[in-house]
Image (cartoon, coloured by chain):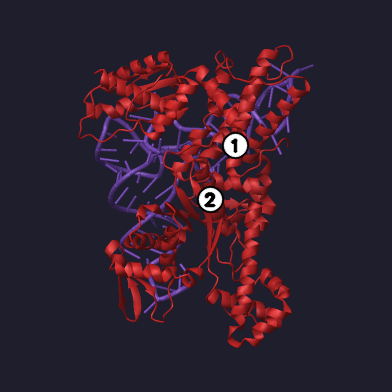
RNA sequence: GCGCCCGUAGCUCAGUGGAUAGAGCGUCAGGUUGCGGACCUGAAGGUCGUGGGUUCGAGUCCCGCCGGGCGCGCCA
């Protein structure tokens, strides 16, 4: 809806310029994009545009005057029923024009308000047609076709498999998955990727710890403790233990690799339970065995950004604004973690992605610039490399912070969290908060308040609608095939329908912002509007089958929007509660 | 010291430069003979950390300051 109104305003502006009522933009003026937003106040219409105010300065005219000229053209648009035929159109404009040709002009009426707002009310028959189109689209309603679809790689969680996922890892998992879902709904192709370290000191320590427990010796100082290590020790096959012992100094590595893979599989299962399925599990060691790191360093060297000093290999990061150069390969011959990062970013681009998103903990912000620098130095577009830094969650139980240490084995696992508060509530919790702000998560509170959790409020609305539809069916009533004529006379029905049809706009905004919380906020608002509607309007009335049929159709439209919003968040939409 | 993030109602948090700053929880007062009361209506509660600046318009953008978190390795 919003896209079509935006297009209508754009067209009205063009025509006003053609007619001489609005001065053309001077050549040296910055381009002005037409914006259409939902006003906070319902008295200001369904949608409004600030175009006239933005034009005022470059056009050297009073905003009110410009607004009146554009409004006059918009009024004409409403009468013409949206028959367009302009030239010089973008893909988005083409799509909007095509949709308008089917649905009719979105413009019902236009008012100009000081200092120059264009306040637009939607045409009821347009809203009705849009509602019909939404129900035809069904599960696809709410998906939008972006004009620039991309293949996006989203790498997240990426916790090293030295222990089960804990609640500290949880936020990244939710944030990453929600971002992927939003991007997919906005028309992008998404690859979910998990990067993990499967070699090196950590794995040796893990192996040493498992062996120590199995053999009844002391766990080494840097070793891992905790119940899961004991479980692994108990499960370690005798044959593997013997082979490790026979290998001499490779014993810890052999056992460690086995344990690490077991843990990784466990992590995969936890994430699957949460509803996250990764497309790619990428091991750090593979970047060395397949030559990615060497190739990337060669590429950097060829571009003149690498030098040797003190026996180490350095990246001249200072060429790109860093405060110091960074070591890629240590004098010992081993690569640094940064070396892996360089190989990895190049390897990702080599797989053909248009855009890379890394979801990292806030403590990794120091490495953001240098990885982007390296990408730029290798000739990639640094703007295509994006890091989302997820702020910390303070986990709290009854007001007291829960401290965690993976090595000491003191932590609450993700599985525990989900068992306590449930997947739906947890998804909602993380989906309704910006990833950049630090938050408190009180586990006891989350459990205690589960009945008042907003997610249940939204789910309840959905279940309630299902119940109404069942009730109608039992009394032999059915929804009308079309909303046609159902909204014109009733402001409450009309407002509810318009709100229910906003989902595509919400998806668009969420994808642009890389945040899901617009979706949770929207679902809450729609549920609230439905509950109010339910109070004021009887849906199933045996004495008035015509009105009932129309309202059932409206209610089904609302249900669809709620169900699709919840599906987008990975949350269930129950038939009853 | 330098860099990044954060500071909005009692609490937990929303708020792509727009019109009267919102939600949930909590508190207080009410509502159902008509379809699910896990619901609805109303009230109280805010110098948007602070001082400047840009703008027709700033919670939002810029600068300074205060407060909190994190990072500044040939660690991973």
Q: Where is residue A500 in the image (x, y as percent from the top left)?
A: 56, 28
Residue A66, image x, y percentages: 28, 21
Kindly identify the residue that appears in the image at 33 percent across and 67 percent down: A300
Q: In which quarter of the image is residue A335?
A: bottom left
Q: Which of A210 and B41 is in front in this view?
A: A210
Measuring from the top left, give residue A566's x and y in whole percent: 61, 39
Residue A160 as seen in the image, left or right of residue B73: right
N-term mark: 1 or 2 = 2
User: Which chain does the purple colour mark?
Assistant: B
Identify which residue is drawn at 42% across, 51% down. Answer: A354
Q: Residues within 10 Å of mark 2 (few under 14, many from 20)?
A: many
Label 1: element kind: helix
Element class at badge 2: helix
Alpha carbons under labels 1 and 2: distance apart: 19 Å
Evaluate whether residue A186 shows in this view. yes
Residue A204, quarter of the rendered image: bottom right
Residue A564: numbered disc: 1
Is residue A443 depicted above or below A344 in this figure? above
* Residue annotated with mark 2: A175
Residue closest to the far right: A474
Chain the render paints red: A
Q: Is residue B48 left or right of residue B52?
A: right
Q: Are marks 1 and 2 on the same chain?
A: yes
| Residue at x 59%, y 67% (from the top left corner) | A161
């Amino acid at each position: 809806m919003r896209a079509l109104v935006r297009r209508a305003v754009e067209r009205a502006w063009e025509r006003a310029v053609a007619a001489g009522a609005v001065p053309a933009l001077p050549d040296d003026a910055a381009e002005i994009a037409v914006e259409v937003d939902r006003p906070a106040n319902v008295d200001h219409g369904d949608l409004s545009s600030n175009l006239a105010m933005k034009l005022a300065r470059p056009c050297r005219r009073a905003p009110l005057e410009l607004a009146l000229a554009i409004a006059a053209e918009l009024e004409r648009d409403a009468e013409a029923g949206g028959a367009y035929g302009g030239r010089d159109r973008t893909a988005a404009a083409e799509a909007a024009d095509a949709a308008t040709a089917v649905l009719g002009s979105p413009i019902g009426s236009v008012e100009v308000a000081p200092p120059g707002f264009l306040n637009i009310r939607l045409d009821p028959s347009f809203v009705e047609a849009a509602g019909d189109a939404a129900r035809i689209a069904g599960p696809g309603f709410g998906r939008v076709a972006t004009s620039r679809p991309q293949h996006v790689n989203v790498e997240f969680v990426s916790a090293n498999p030295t222990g089960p996922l804990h609640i500290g890892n949880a936020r990244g998992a939710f944030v990453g998955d929600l971002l992927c879902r939003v991007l997919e709904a906005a028309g992008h192709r998404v690859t979910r990727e998990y990067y993990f370290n499967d070699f090196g000191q950590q794995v040796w320590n893990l192996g040493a710890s498992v062996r120590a427990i199995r053999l009844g010796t002391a766990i080494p100082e840097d070793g891992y403790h905790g119940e899961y290590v004991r479980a692994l020790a108990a499960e370690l096959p005798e044959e593997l233990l013997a082979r490790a012992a026979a290998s001499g100094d490779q014993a810890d590595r052999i056992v460690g690799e086995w344990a690490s893979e077991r843990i990784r599989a466990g992590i995969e299962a936890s994430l699957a339970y949460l509803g996250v399925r990764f497309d790619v599990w990428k091991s750090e060691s593979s970047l060395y065995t397949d030559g990615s790191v060497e190739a990337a360093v060669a590429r950097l060297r060829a571009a003149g950004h690498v030098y040797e000093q003190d026996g180490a290999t350095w990246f001249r990061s200072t060429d790109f604004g860093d405060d110091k150069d960074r070591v890629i390969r240590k004098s010992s011959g081993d690569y640094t973690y940064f070396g892996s990062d360089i190989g990895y970013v190049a390897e990702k681009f080599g797989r053909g992605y248009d855009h890379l998103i890394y979801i990292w903990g806030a403590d990794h912000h120091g490495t953001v610039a240098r990885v982007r620098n390296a990408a730029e130095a290798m000739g990639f577009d640094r703007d295509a490399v994006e890091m989302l830094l997820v702020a910390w969650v303070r986990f709290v139980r009854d007001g007291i912070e829960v401290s965690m240490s993976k090595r000491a084995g003191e932590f609450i696992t993700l599985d525990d969290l989900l068992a306590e508060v449930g997947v739906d509530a947890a998804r909602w919790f993380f989906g309704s908060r910006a990833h950049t702000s630090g938050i408190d998560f009180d586990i006891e509170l989350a459990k205690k308040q589960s009945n008042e959790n907003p997610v249940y409020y939204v789910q309840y609305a959905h279940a309630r609608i299902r119940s109404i539809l069942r009730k109608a069916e039992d009394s032999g009533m059915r929804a009308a095939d079309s909303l046609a004529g159902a909204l014109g006379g009733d402001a409450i029905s009309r407002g509810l329908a318009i709100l229910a049809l906003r989902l595509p706009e919400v998806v668009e905004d969420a994808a642009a912002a890389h945040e899901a919380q617009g979706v949770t906020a929207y679902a809450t608002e729609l549920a609230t509007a439905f509950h109010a509607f339910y109070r004021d309007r009887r849906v199933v009335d045996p004495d008035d089958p015509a009105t009932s049929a129309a309202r059932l159709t409206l209610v089904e439209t609302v249900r669809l929007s709620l169900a699709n919003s919840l599906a987008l968040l990975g949350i269930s939409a129950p038939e009853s509660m």
